[in-house]
Structure formats: structure tokens, C-alpha cells
Image (cartoon, rainbow, N blue to C red):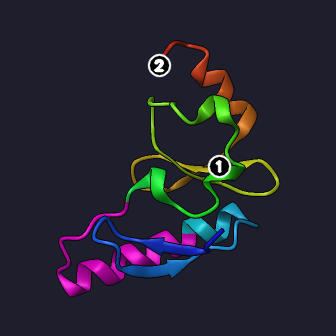
Amino acid sequence: MSDEIKTNAGRVVGHWDGQQATQLMSELANIRQQMLKEGSEDKLIAREMPHRDQLPEDLHSFKAYHIWGCDAGGNCVVGTNANRIESIQKVRSFSLIEHH
């Protein structure tokens, strides 16, 4: 699997190895800043981040909020702005409230 983070237009704008959620959160913040400086109209799509296979199958259709990625330890980068980290268990408990 590729570590490339791509925009909706297919442009490679960063990388994430799937190991630490904090690294993904930081990388996404840096990418957004760079895209803002460029005046880019490209978008980042949460469901198209690298290592999506680390997210448990039952959360693939989760819609209550964005899940940007899940690291090898079970921590997920979540939220519209990819600015929070939650455990898979916490996301699952929220998913049981029929938000998807």
C-alpha cells in the first residue's frame, strides 16, 4: 500500500506511514497550510487517505464525522479539520448511536 496523501485531483501532497495518528494529524495540518498558501482549490478526501485498511471494516461506512485515518495502535484522526485523535473504541461507541 502506498503512503501517498493525494488531493481529489490526484496530486501527491504528503505521506503517512500508518504508524502514528499524531503524525497524520500534523501532516494534514501542514498540507492544508501549504494548499492555502498556494491558493489551491484541491481538496483532501478523508476516505482516500493511505492505510485505510487499518480502519476496522465496521467503521468504513461511519458518517457521523470524518475519520481521516487509523494508526497501527488503534488511534484515529477524526473531525472535519482532522484535529482530534480518538480510539477505535470511542469511535465505535459513538457509531452505536445510529449516526450511520
Disc number placed over residue 99 in the picture, else none:
2
Report the residue at 65% width, 71% height from top. Answer: 23
Give residue 63's quadrant in the image. Answer: top left
Q: Nearer the viewer, residue 97 or 46?
A: 46
Report the residue at 48% width, 70% height from top. Answer: 28
Q: Residues within 10 Å of mark 2 (few under 14, many from 20)?
A: few
Q: Is residue 80 above or below residue 51?
A: above
In this picture, residue 75 sits left or right of residue 50: right
Q: Quadrant of the N terminus?
A: bottom right
Q: Main secondary structure of the magenta part?
A: helix
* Residue 95 is at least partly visible in this image: yes
Report the residue at 58% width, 22% height from top. Answer: 95
Q: Amino acid at mark 1?
A: Cys
Q: Position of residue 22 (x, y in %)?
A: 66, 65
Tell me where the magenta segment starts and ends, as one range.
26-44
Where does label 1 land, which residue?
76
Q: Position of residue 14 (x, y in %)?
A: 49, 80
Q: Amino acid at mark 2?
A: His
Disc number placed over residue 45 in the picture, else none:
none
Q: Is residue 30 above or below residue 74?
A: below
